[in-house]
Amino acid sequence: MQSSLARPPPPPPLIRAGPASVTYRARPRSAPVVRCHGEASPAAAAGWAPPGPYTGRDPEAKKPAWLRQRAAQGEKYAKLRESLGELKLNTVCVEAQCPNIGECWNGGGGAGGEGDGIATATIMLLGDTCTRGCRFCAVKTSNKPPPPDALEPLKTAVAVASWGVDYVVLTSVDRDDIPDGGSGHFAETVRALKELKPEILVECLTSDFRGDLEAVASLANSGLDVYAHNIETVRSLQRVVRDPRAGYDQSLAVLKHAKALKEGMVTKSSIMLGLGETDKEVKQTMADLRAIDVDILTLGQYLQPTERHLRVREYVTPEKFDFWKEYGESLGFVFVASGPLVRSSYRAGELFVQNFVRRKKAELVSAA
């Protein structure tokens, strides 16, 4: 999204923000954009710092109406949460404070239920504690998280098979403390799922495994159907937004390698908007993903989990998200999910991907 803010240098450990304001600007032939400015002017405070996506709350930057969601509730939501709790399984829906938890867990009926009955949840493997400290993420972090549960792959497979779903997303925290980054644990879970329910489609939303392409290959060859890895943001904001161990080129290398390993492999990535990126940078990121033949892209609004996380720089309008969807499809992505509340694991996208993957599989069988 086009930003009126200059590209910042790496932020200092502490800044003082002056009075905040929210301004509305309409550009010709473009959707209006809500911009959030929370920095003091140079004359306003001795502790001024150059504009940048810093932390801290902006008390005057209110969420637009299109981002307001009712609290999750409903019978399906309650039952699924109880089931996950009994099995001691983690979900990114809970740990990362996903705003769509009511819609997904209630089967598409929004926060209160009454959808089509197809509930989806994204299982988070390898525990609930990440070894990295990305400045956008609400998942708790530690240099020495507890060891993974050796029975988790089997427990996950049994639970998912019992739900009767046709498509499941597996993701995980980053585990830089494990030699293969947890790739083997992922692969074991995929194989267990496929053994219990051969027809199930499995998407794995993975870390970058520190750029270890052997770990990528181990997982890509486990039987999964969709290899997803998020590039998260544009190149210029990588070091501000993500942990230093992550990186733009490293993420591209992971997706490129996964695509090349297996004929028919579907790849997927995601971009957060509202962190200070420009339209030109978003277009370049999308072009870079298409250059390595990524099939599916999701774009969503970054929301600040706590005051310790990066401040929202811009609330992108639904109209602008519609523009990005059309633009992405014009580049050749087979599917683009783009909206303020869209996340990398997103129910509407998963339903499309399910049909797309089955169609590709049928084409491969026919060609053989």
Image (spheres, rainbow, N blue to C red):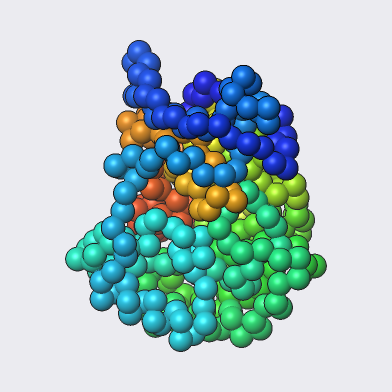
What residue is rendered at 31% in x and 49% in y? 68
What residue is rendered at 51% in x and 24% in y? 3
Residue 2: x and y, percent? Answer: 49, 24
Residue 277: x and y, percent? Answer: 55, 30
Residue 144: x and y, percent? Answer: 76, 70
> In which quadrant of the rendered view does residue 7 lie?
top right
Vertical placement of residue 223 versus 283, above or below: below
Spot the residue most to the top: 28
What residue is rendered at 65% in x and 51% in y? 134
Quick check: 197 left or right of 114?
A: right
Quick check: 140 left or right of 339?
A: right
Residue in the foreground of this view, choosing between 141 and 252: 141
Residue in the foreground of this view, choosing between 315 and 186: 315
Vertical placement of residue 79 versus 215, above or below: below
Residue 325 seen by the camera: no
Spot the residue most to the right: 179
Residue 149: x and y, percent? Answer: 64, 82
Residue in the foreground of this view, choosing between 305 and 343: 305
Residue 73 seen by the camera: yes
